[in-house]
């Protein structure tokens, strides 16, 4: 089946023309770089997204700590991941890149801090 | 920060960086989504990560003095500055001044949305700060006005936080945001985008109860009979940004009344010699990478104005 999709890898937003048979990519056109090719394949086989959100802190200089997954996670796990994030409270100072939850939900990506936060 | 670092690299000895917030980084601190730095750092960072890379460089440079919680209240044509910091009013005279004061959000009052004035109507960027930095969720069912990048990003953010986002209302025929944001913020979460529609009224006494929406034609006139209503308790208004240039105006510079940007022949310049403007204060950017690029240029322009020369190691004879 032929269809088009918009690449979301970078702000250029290339329009990709895709031919796929279920979860198998047959042909691809319209991408301006290699990221587009790997995005199309991933999106057909198993779409993933990087989750960014913020978690509650206690005793740190800001009320919320911005966090992200260290790698994209399956798109259908986003809401489950948000549920898990809500149960986390960060209480010790962190640096940018500090791991907040290792192998988050067993998805193979860590939840990491996006900025340093000192104690109050 | 980019301007300060570039000015230092171009030979300026003494840089004072004034920030009114308690942290460096400005708006990047609340932009926790990814998409920053693909050009400048060749990797995809979130706003706080992008800011942190610059904070670290600034902190390492002993020629840059950082003064936080410092609010500039006066700027003159001769580059005299007054600023308030906790417990003191300071005055400095600068050789050159670079204004990186960013933007304000346009508000509901700046576009005609008739109706009552209940609680629950927020500029989208304010809602972003509330959710991402304060941990407050502004409502349970939301309608977003305007499909610029901030409106799109906030649609996704609210959806992730469990808010029912009923739709994004855009008066134009196409979204003003990046295509990737329409895809990853709306399509991923099945949020409908109503192009060529506008909110004709907001209803509610104490809290927003619903909005009236109407389709418009090519001339942006309401199409009779096309109206419908949407129940919601929250309306986010994302209808553009206005550069913040009050200090520049105070210094007597020419300001374009329509865009609120400095009137000058080149990017970063103002009509006052030795006073430069960069980033969103100079023009509204859609990518932070270009803000960095142009702000670095502003730093070098200021250095050139001051007649600074990069430090070179002593030549051996």
Image: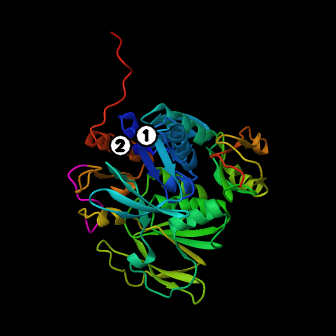
Write down the chain letter for disc 1. Answer: B
Write down the chain letter for disc 2. Answer: B
Q: Is residue B302 left or right of residue B161?
A: left
Q: Is residue B270 left or right of residue B147?
A: left
Residue B5 numbered tag:
1
Residue B179, percent from left and from top: 45, 52
Find out whether residue B265 is within the magenta segment: yes
Magenta part of the protein: which range? B256-266
Mark 1 packing: few (<14 Cα in 10 Å), some, or many (20+)?
A: many
Q: What is the residue that sits farthest to the left in this orientation?
A: B265
Earlier sequence position, callout 2 versus callout 1: 1
Residue A73, percent from left and from top: 67, 43
Residue occupying image coordinates x 37% and y 67%: B172
Q: Main secondary structure of the magenta part?
A: loop
**Vertical order, B260 against A65 (above or below):** below
Is residue B6 visible in the rendered structure shown here? yes
Report the number of numbered marks.
2
Corner quadrant of residue B221: bottom left
Q: Disc 2 designates what residue? A: B299
Marks 2 and 1 in Cβ contact (< 8 Å): yes
Helix, strand or loop status at disc 1: helix
Location of the C terminus of chain B by quadrant is top left
Residue occupying image coordinates x 58% and y 75%: B234
Q: How is the image coloured?
A: rainbow
Spatial CA distance of label 2 from label 1 is 7 Å
Residue B170, percent from left and from top: 43, 68
Residue occupying image coordinates x 44% and y 73%: B107
Residue occupying image coordinates x 53% and y 44%: B55
Observer-nearest of B68 and B57 = B68
Observer-nearest of B80 and B300 = B80
């Amino acid at each position: 089946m032929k269809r088009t999709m918009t690449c979301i890898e970078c702000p250029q937003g290339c329009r990709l023309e895709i031919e796929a048979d279920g979860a198998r990519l047959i042909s691809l056109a319209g991408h301006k770089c290699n990221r587009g090719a790997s995005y199309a394949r991933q999106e057909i086989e198993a779409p993933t997204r990087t989750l960014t959100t913020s978690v509650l802190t206690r005793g740190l200089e800001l009320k919320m700590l911005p966090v992200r997954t260290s790698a994209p996670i399956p798109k259908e796990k986003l809401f489950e991941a948000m549920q898990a994030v809500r149960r986390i409270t960060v209480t010790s100072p962190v640096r940018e890149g500090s791991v907040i939850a290792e192998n988050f939900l067993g998805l193979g990506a860590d939840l990491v801090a996006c900025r340093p936060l000192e104690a109050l | 920060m980019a301007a300060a670092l570039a000015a230092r690299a171009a030979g300026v000895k003494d840089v004072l960086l004034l920030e009114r917030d308690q942290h460096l980084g400005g708006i990047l601190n609340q932009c926790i989504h990814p998409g920053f730095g693909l050009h400048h750092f060749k990797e995809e960072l979130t706003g706080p990560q992008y800011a942190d890379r610059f904070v670290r460089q600034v902190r390492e440079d002993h020629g840059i003095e950082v003064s936080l919680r410092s609010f500039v209240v006066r700027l003159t044509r001769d580059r005299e500055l007054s600023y308030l910091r906790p417990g003191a009013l300071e005055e400095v005279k600068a050789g050159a001044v670079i204004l990186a004061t960013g933007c304000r959000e346009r508000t509901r009052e700046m576009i005609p949305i008739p109706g009552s004035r209940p609680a629950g109507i927020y500029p989208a960027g304010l809602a972003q700060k509330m959710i991402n930095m304060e941990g407050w969720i502004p409502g349970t069912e939301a309608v977003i006005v305007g499909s610029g990048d901030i409106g799109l990003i906030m649609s996704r953010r609210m959806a992730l936080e469990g808010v029912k986002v009923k739709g994004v209302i855009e008066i134009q025929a196409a979204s003003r945001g990046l295509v990737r944001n329409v895809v990853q913020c709306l399509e991923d979460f099945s949020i409908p985008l109503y192009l060529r529609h506008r909110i004709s009224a907001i209803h509610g006494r104490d809290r927003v109860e619903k909005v009236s929406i109407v389709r418009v034609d090519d001339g942006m006139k309401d199409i009779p009979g096309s109206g419908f209503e949407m129940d919601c308790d929250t309306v986010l208004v994302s209808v553009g940004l206005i550069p913040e240039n009050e200090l520049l105006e105070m210094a007597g510079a020419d300001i374009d009344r329509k865009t609120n940007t400095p009137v000058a022949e080149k990017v970063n310049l103002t009509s006052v010699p030795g006073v430069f403007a960069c980033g969103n204060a100079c023009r509204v950017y859609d990518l932070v990478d270009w803000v960095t690029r142009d702000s670095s240029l502003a730093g070098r322009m200021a250095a050139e104005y001051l007649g600074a020369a990069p430090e070179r190691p002593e030549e051996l004879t």
